[in-house]
Image (spheres, grey):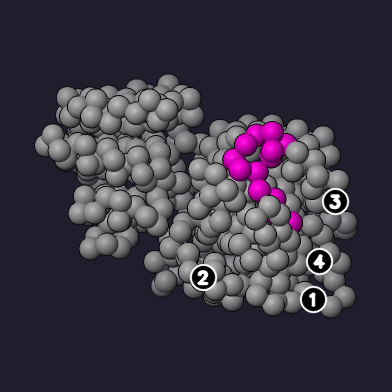
């Protein structure tokens, strides 16, 4: 069916939305918040019904900057949508809670939001996603999650959706990029202990598929960091390229330790790892680093979807506008776009519930939403992002290193 004008601009121009974590405006405080899509004094649409989208966000704790960014993007999307007349006769009220990146807190929050009538809940990160799933599955509430797409492939419930691909597929894609675009003959990978187990198991096959040698696999345990030893392990393997499936602080530390012993490969960072502090953390070592992206970054202002995204965030709050360079703002915005599409389709067919939204999203195939160029959901996978691009840090900014390409599926 045809999308309403505002969603058509935001979605058809190329992107997909992820769902936001914590409230950065619209009446939020340190522990909870809500917005009727009203930002710094926004509006709702006269005559519309109101539905609730719940957000379980790490507003405090080790990933608070991610929670803040994702919340801003999610809330900004629905603020703009409500101001533009709503979605299929509905306004969306966003209710946020702080889960401190703890599974039990996320479970409690999900139960509370379900009791309040939420039709969808967003949780960011593997731990909060797992925590929320019991309540959402039991109540047929949509669960959107910004975490490893493996948690959604296959979907554990009909209403589970994410725009993130599986992390092992991102690794396979990066290894392929290193082979084809960087002319690497050997590639090493750096993964998180536990969270990187699936990628670890798929690394040999991914290297073989790309026609390169796997140098080494470094499994990070940040509770017992061994930066010098990890850097030496990478140097001894001698790979021309190293893929890091972790956060930017980890990459910066590895780059410094490796440079200290004369090892300067081409570094590739997973999309979820890049943050606004990386350039300062890495200093001159950031130059030439390749950043994978599943959505257009905010620097791509020539893209209509990006200018629409920027306008929505700037129109929502000054606080959110100030962190537009945080890629998690786009993550929140893009999950919100997916939810909005499901709401619109469900409204056209009748009542809007978690169950009807979940059914409607089954129809998504190769469609752009928000700043994500292509999303596909199948019976086998609700990990929707199916394209990736690569951007190189050049003179302190991200510069596109090639066209969008299909995500490589790891065996």
**Distance from label 4 to label 2 (Cα)?**
26 Å
Asked if residue 300 is positioned above or below residue 30 in the image, the reply reads below
| Mark before the other along the chain sequence, 3 or 2 | 3
Q: Residue at label 4?
A: 90
- Say whether marks 3 and 1 touch (CB < 8 Å): no
Look at the image and tell me in which quarter the C terminus lies: top left
| Helix, strand or loop at mark 4 | strand
User: How many other residues sit within 10 Å of disc 1, few (<14), some (14-19) or many (≥20)?
Assistant: some
**Distance from label 2 to label 1 (Cα)?**
24 Å
Q: Residue at x 61, y 72 (%)?
A: 316
Q: Residue at label 2?
A: 321
Which residue occupies the foreground of this view, 77 or 153? 77
Which residue occupies the foreground of this view, 73 or 403? 73
Q: Going by the image, does 111 lie left or right of 75?
A: right
Q: Quadrant of residue 227?
A: top left
| Helix, strand or loop at mark 1 | loop
| Mark before the other along the chain sequence, 4 or 2 | 4
Q: Residue at x 38, y 25 (%)?
A: 224
- Which is in the foreground here, disc 3 or disc 1? 3
| Mark before the other along the chain sequence, 3 or 1 | 1
Q: Residue furthest left?
A: 262
- Which is in the foreground here, disc 4 or disc 3? 3
| Number of the label disc, if any, that sits on residue 45 | 1
| Helix, strand or loop at mark 2 | helix
Q: Going by the image, does 124 lie left or right of 322?
A: right
Q: Which x, y percent locates residue 57?
A: 63, 48
Q: Which residues are magenta?
A: 94-107
Q: Residue at label 3?
A: 117
| Helix, strand or loop at mark 3 | loop
- Which is in the foreground here, disc 4 or disc 2? 2
């Amino acid at each position: 069916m045809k999308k309403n004008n505002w969603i058509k601009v935001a979605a058809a121009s190329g992107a997909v939305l992820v769902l936001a974590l914590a409230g950065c405006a619209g009446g939020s405080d340190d522990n909870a918040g809500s917005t009727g899509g009203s930002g710094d004094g926004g509006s709702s649409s006269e005559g519309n019904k109101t539905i609730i989208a719940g957000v379980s966000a790490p507003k405090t704790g080790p990933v608070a900057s991610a929670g803040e960014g994702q919340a801003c993007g999610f809330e900004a999307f629905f603020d703009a949508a409500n101001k533009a007349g709503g979605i299929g006769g509905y306004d969306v009220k966003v209710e946020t809670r702080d889960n401190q990146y703890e599974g039990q807190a996320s479970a409690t929050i999900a139960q509370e939001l379900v009791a309040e009538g939420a039709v969808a809940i967003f949780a960011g990160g593997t731990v909060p996603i797992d925590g929320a799933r019991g309540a959402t599955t039991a109540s047929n509430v949509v669960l959107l999650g910004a975490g490893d797409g493996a948690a959604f492939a296959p979907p554990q419930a009909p209403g589970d959706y994410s725009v993130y691909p599986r992390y092992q597929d991102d690794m396979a894609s990066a290894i392929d990029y290193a082979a084809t675009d960087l002319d690497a003959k050997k590639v090493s990978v750096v993964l998180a202990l536990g969270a990187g187990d699936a990628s670890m198991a798929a690394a040999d096959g991914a290297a073989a598929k790309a026609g390169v040698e796997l140098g080494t696999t470094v499994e990070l345990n940040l509770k017992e960091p061994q930066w010098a030893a990890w850097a030496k392990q990478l140097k001894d393997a001698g790979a021309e390229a190293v893929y890091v499936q972790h956060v930017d602080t980890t990459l910066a530390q590895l780059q410094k330790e490796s440079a200290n012993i004369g090892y300067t490969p081409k570094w590739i960072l997973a999309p979820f790892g890049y943050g606004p502090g990386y350039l300062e953390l890495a200093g001159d070592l950031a130059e030439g680093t390749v950043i994978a992206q599943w959505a257009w970054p905010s620097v791509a202002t020539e893209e209509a979807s990006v200018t629409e995204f920027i306008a929505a965030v700037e129109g929502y709050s000054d606080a959110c506008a100030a962190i537009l360079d945080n890629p998690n703002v786009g993550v929140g915005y893009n999950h919100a776009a997916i939810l909005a599409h499901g709401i619109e389709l469900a409204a056209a067919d009748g009542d809007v519930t978690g169950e009807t939204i979940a059914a409607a999203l089954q129809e998504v195939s190769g469609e752009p939403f928000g700043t994500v160029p292509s999303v596909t959901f199948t019976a086998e996978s609700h990990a929707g992002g199916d394209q990736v691009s690569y951007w190189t840090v050049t003179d302190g900014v991200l510069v596109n290193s090639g066209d969008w390409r299909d995500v490589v599926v790891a065996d």
